[in-house]
Amino acid sequence: MDINEIRADFPILKKKINGNKLIYFDNAATTQKPRQVIDAISKFYKEKNANIHRGVHTLSQEATYLYEEAHKVVGEFINSKKWQEIVFVRNTTEALNLLSYILGKSYLKEGDLVLTTKLEHHSNILPWLLLKEIKGIRVKLVEITKEGILDLEDLENKLKEGAKVLAITHTSNVTGWITPLKEIIKKAKREGAIVVVDGAQAVPHFKVDVQELDVDFYGFSGHKMLGPMGIGVLYGKEELLSKLPPFLSGGDMLDTLSLTNKTCQLCLKTLPWKYEAGTSNVEGAIGIMEAIKYIKKIGWDFIAENEKKLLSFALNNLKEMKNIEIYGPKNDENRVGVIPFNVKGFSANEVATILDQYGIAIRSGYHCAQPFHEAIGIPSSARMSFYFYNKIEEVKKTISVLRKLK
């Protein structure tokens, strides 16, 4: 595919920052949106805007069809057994908080062990720590190596302590390292643990098959895969979600509610509506559906090939610069296009601020992963993260600016 034709689909890439053409290397935080996604959302508001599941009129029926179709498209995208196993939430953070709440309410009891890791985004640590304060569960974090990858021996040892839940990332948002998730899930299942996966950094970059992984729960966000903000996905096995309690209560999550002087009778709806109380983010669902169609049009082969080309070129050039320290794996194998680094003599924020003067957008700080930075002994880091619409010429310009920092 022609990279320039692809880039023409992204209006924001024509923007100039401080007189320079935008170079957007903050894709791990959020990706840019193609006009196809923008137009689909705009078309909904112009032609079909109505609330779903609440009206027999034409607009409501049309909106309902699109919303339910989005569940089916997402289910096919990650190969869920049924589309009813797809629950729409606001983002990965809400998916993980939803799980900590419903598992804490009906599955976990005081003293039970939940394992997570020092590789995680805060969203997959904090909900479990808060549950510890509320319910009295135990929470342990699996260690990482000096290279910033998971200590698999420590994971195996801690699983044997009787962990009831393993909450783990599929791909690190700091280093881009891809965990050997299928093997980890097998080990967790042997020890009787339920597996909760943060897939926010995985789903945009390579094909995820939840059935092949045999994962119990899997969450990801629309905005990191070309979709709009405010829409995310929680996948859960039907046999587990159907037994667990609802998260929110209100309109559209129950079939009947009967109140008398003596009793209150309610009947919850089936999946996924049991977990989708209130007015739904219909336009967000349409946006993520359109984003999936766009990703499929681009194709996983092109996405992987272009990201690897960008990653290899950037790593090889950064390694040659004596004043730059790179974290995580030192090669381009088994990782997506994310590079955390620091420049000697400069804070991460200073590096990001200087690059911004040249129109180059990167992330700096903890990247919502403070335990990771503490574990490898650094205060913060700068982070470049690529997506398939980035070009080698953009990496070259970034490298040339970094060479000036002495």
Image (cartoon, helix red, strand yellow):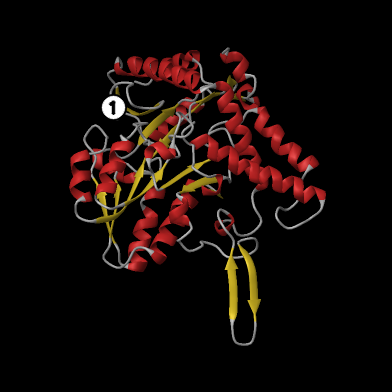
Q: Is residue 5 left or right of residue 197?
A: right
How many numbered marks have been drawn onto this rendered protein structure? 1
* Residue 247 vertical placement versus 288 (above, below): below
Residue visible at 62% across and 41% down? 70
Give x and y (percent) for residue 316. Answer: 33, 15
- Categorize mark 1 by other alpha carbons within 10 Å: few (<14), some (14-19), many (20+): some
Residue 391 can be seen, yes or no: yes
Query: What element does badge 1 sit on?
Result: loop
Looking at the picture, tell me which residue is in the foreground, 115 or 389: 115
Give x and y (percent) for residue 388. Answer: 51, 22
Mark 1: amino acid: Pro
* Residue 264 vertical placement versus 184 (above, below): below
Give x and y (percent) for residue 237. Answer: 45, 49
Residue visible at 26% across and 50% down? 141
Looking at the picture, tell me which residue is in the foreground, 171 or 122: 171
Q: Residue 187 lies in what quarter of the image?
A: top left
Residue indicated by mark 1? 329
Give the quarter of the figure containing the C terminus: top left
Give the quarter of the figure containing the N terminus: top right
Residue 377 can be seen, yes or no: no
Give x and y (percent) for residue 175. Answer: 35, 32
Residue visible at 24% across and 31% down? 147
User: Outermost residue, bottom direction?
Assistant: 261
Q: Is residue 390 left or right of residue 278?
A: left
Q: Is residue 233 left or right of residue 351?
A: right
* Residue 162 vertical placement versus 261 (above, below): above
Q: Is residue 406 left or right of residue 53?
A: left
